Image (cartoon, rainbow, N blue to C red):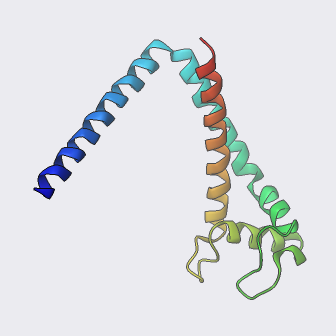
Amino acid sequence: QLGIRVMGIFTDFLTDVAYLAEDVVDFVIDNPIKVTAVVATTVATGGLSLVAAPAIAAAAGGAGLLGATSTGVAISGLSGAALTSASLAALGGGTIAAGGAGVAGGTAAITAAGATASAIASGVGVAVTK
């Protein structure tokens, strides 16, 4: 009985996803210029976020927003490359040795946040224009 209900819910969910996908495809076909603008803005902002990731992380670390390194040193007390690396590692969930994603993870997190914010902002901009 429960298995049949779960399958019904799952089937309804997949049907809703299929209809949503159809709506998205229709919107893209009907609005190629708007979609291109959103995609271009998102890609450009993601690229800028990637380039700016070290500076963004260092600013957050220097402001004391990221706590301490795995050795217990306050990130805000560091400077230069040590501040940047420790800040990016903290944003990446910690060093690779400590089980986090390290500097690459922090860079990816900042890049994803920048691209996501851009996609939302440009998407809202497109949604309010006709």
**Front residue (pair 21, 48):** 21
**Quarter residue 67 falls in:** bottom right
Image quarter (top left, top right, bottom left or bottom right) of the C terminus: top right
User: Which residue is found at the position 88% from the left and 70% from the top?
Assistant: 80
User: Which residue is found at the position 38% from the left and 23% from the top?
Assistant: 23
Depicted 130 relative to depicted 98: above or below: above
Residue 115: % across, % down: 63, 43
User: Which residue is found at the position 87% from the left and 65% from the top?
Assistant: 63
Image quarter (top left, top right, bottom left or bottom right) of the N terminus: bottom left
Farthest residue, direction bottom: 71
Farthest residue, direction left: 1
Depicted 99 relative to depicted 80: above or below: below
Residue 53: % across, % down: 74, 55
Residue 5: % across, % down: 17, 50
**Quarter residue 62 falls in:** bottom right
Residue 124: % across, % down: 62, 28
User: Which residue is found at the position 75% from the left and 73% from the top?
Assistant: 86
Farthest residue, direction front: 1
**Quarter residue 8 falls in:** top left
Whether residue 107 sits left or right of residue 22 in the image: it is right
Depicted 104 relative to depicted 100: above or below: above
